[in-house]
Amino acid sequence: MQTELSFIDLISHASLLVQLVMLALLVASVVSWAMIVDRYRTLKAARGSTERFEEQFWSGGDLGELYKELNSGEQDPGGIGNIFSAGFREFARSRRTRGIAPEAVVEGSRRSMQVALSRELDVLENSLPFLATVGSISPYVGLFGTVWGIMHSFQALGNVQQASLSMVAPGIAEALIATAMGLFAAIPAVVAYNRYSNDVERLHSRYEEFIDEFTSILQRQAHTQ
């Protein structure tokens, strides 16, 4: 007579250490999925705000009015908007200070934008190290649970005189679940990390390009006014 064990039965009959490994992988998978969804929303919002800001910026309007609009509290300036605000704020403050050379005014604005850029990148890259960690170590954690479970199953055979496959199979099956759960946690995390890292790098490039272009505009204004 054969006894068919369900997925829940295999987990419930696993050793305590293997169950702890499965629980850790399950928690890691749930947390990584929550971060995947959060990063998706954050990066989508960053791309959208960048598109809207660049359309406003290059429309030929007054930069002072654009700065007031972005800082009126009616809308979120977004990443590139915060970079622009930091540079324009420093430029306007330095221009009101007597005795500062135009080159120093522009350089101060550029430094302010670089600081704002670093803050925005920190926001965009949040949770990515965790996804990289889950993607890299989860298979090994699952493999550890599998090896331990198989060792536990074979050690149990030492207490019987006659061993059979039906005695070993359930223990091996429950141990292999740990490897499956490790892959289940790792694969989405790796895919999301690679995708989001590429998205962050593209936004970083766009931010850097904007800083260069805006710095050129400020240089012209600093020497003409």
Image (tube, rainbow, N blue to C red):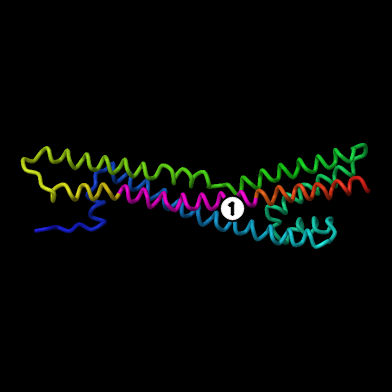
- Dot 1 falls on a residue whose secondary structure is helix
Q: Quadrant location of residue 163? A: top left
Residue at 13% of width from left, 41% of height from top? 157
Quadrant where the N terminus lies? bottom left
> Few, some or many C-alpha atoms within 10 Å of disc 1 (few <14, some 14-19, many ≥20)?
some
Left or right relative to 125: residue 216: right
Provide residue 64's location: percent of width, then percent of height. Answer: 84, 55
Residue sitting nearer the eye, 159 or 197: 197
Provide residue 207's location: percent of width, then percent of height. Answer: 70, 50
Provide residue 120's location: percent of width, then percent of height. Answer: 65, 48
Q: Looking at the image, is 115 positioned above or below residue 199? A: above
Please name the predominant secondary structure of the magenta segment in the image. helix
Left or right relative to 57: residue 51: left
Residue 24 falls within the magenta-colored stretch: no
Q: Amino acid at mark 1?
A: Asp
Left or right relative to 96: residue 207: left
Residue at 71% of width from left, 42% of height from top? 115
Q: Looking at the image, is 96 positioned above or below residue 1? A: above
Q: Looking at the image, is 181 positioned above or below residue 48? A: above
> Mark 1 — residue?
199
> What range is drawn magenta here?
178-203
* Residue projecting furthest to the left: 161
